Image (cartoon, rainbow, N blue to C red):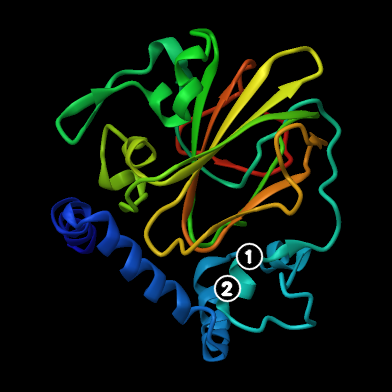
């Protein structure tokens, strides 16, 4: 019943609002989580969302304080220690793998009456993504860690901002088209060229209540990035799409992937 209502509201009401309305309402909603009183919901939220209490022990407040100052401080938490990586390519974020497959095998998605290929997600250079690349869509639920890291060692070759809507991201709302929001929503595309000359394409997708997608300080075209280095942060809600030259080992739809774990 609840899911049916959310799906109806998302598709028929929120999804049809002008982008300016979506943005204004999202901005207001997001500011509530920056108020000091919002820290009182962290405890109940954790008890409801985390079965393993040790999961949260690896993080500290984003503000640098000894305790979380508000819910946003908790939501944008950071690792206490750098991510330990012993492979050449990793997942750039934590979340639910809701779509995966070769780029050439992805189907067209109908967006506002027009059919688009998933390459459209990656903006101006989407058509240059080779057919034999692999597409992944990772949905970051509210209880996930919400920072995006570099999947490889390389050089940032492009940063592109694409304006758009802020429709609901939850994949179960769209049934067979979980990547539809990534084709509609505001996003920042970051391309990284590895030392072997291959390009990796990342699309950091915003959604309702995402007041801002904050890119890492100093990140620019030509920046050298190390595997596991932070690229950006979501302030509430998010999705990350990836087009990579190598497959994800044992990738299964519906599985949880972890930032820094082998692709």
State the residue in front, 246 or 188. 188
Query: Alpha-carbon distance for marks 1 and 2?
Result: 6 Å
- Image quadrant where residue 123 sits: top left
**Disc number for residue 72:** 2
Residue contact between numbered discs 1 and 2, judged by CB atoms under 8 Å: yes
Q: Secondary structure at mark 1?
A: loop
Q: Residue at x 82, y 63 (%)?
A: 80
| Side of 65 where 22 appears, left or right | left
Q: Which residue is mark 1?
A: 76
State the residue in front, 142 or 48. 142
Q: Quadrant of the C terminus?
A: top right
Q: Is residue 28 above or below residue 95?
A: below
Q: Secondary structure at mark 2?
A: helix
Q: Residue at x 37, y 67 (%)?
A: 26
| Side of 89 where 113 appears, left or right | left
Q: Position of residue 257 (x, y in %)?
A: 60, 41
């Amino acid at each position: 019943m609840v899911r049916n209502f959310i799906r109806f509201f998302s598709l028929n009401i929120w999804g049809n609002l002008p982008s300016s309305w979506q943005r204004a309402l999202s901005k207001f909603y997001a500011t509530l989580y920056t108020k000091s009183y919002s820290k009182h919901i962290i405890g109940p939220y954790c008890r409801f969302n985390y079965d393993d209490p040790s999961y949260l022990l690896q993080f500290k407040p984003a503000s640098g304080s000894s305790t979380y100052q508000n819910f946003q401080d908790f939501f944008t938490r950071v690792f206490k220690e750098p991510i330990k990586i012993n492979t050449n390519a990793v997942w750039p974020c934590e979340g639910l793998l809701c779509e995966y497959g070769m780029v050439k095998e992805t189907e067209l998605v109908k967006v506002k009456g027009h059919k688009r290929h998933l390459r459209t997600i990656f903006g101006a250079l989407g058509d240059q993504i080779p057919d034999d690349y692999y597409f992944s869509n990772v949905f970051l639920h509210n209880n996930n860690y919400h920072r995006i890291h570099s999947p490889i060692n390389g050089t940032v070759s492009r940063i592109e901002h694409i304006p758009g809507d802020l429709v609901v991201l939850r994949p179960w709302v769209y049934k067979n088209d979980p990547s539809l929001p990534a084709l509609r929503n505001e996003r920042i595309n970051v391309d990284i060229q590895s030392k072997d000359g291959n390009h990796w394409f990342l699309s950091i997708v915003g959604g309702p209540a995402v007041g801002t997608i904050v890119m890492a300080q100093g990140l620019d075209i030509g920046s050298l990035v190390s595997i596991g280095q932070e690229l950006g942060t979501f302030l509430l809600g998010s999705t990350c799409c990836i087009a990579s030259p190598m497959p994800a080992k044992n990738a299964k739809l519906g599985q949880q992937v972890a930032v820094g774990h082998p692709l």
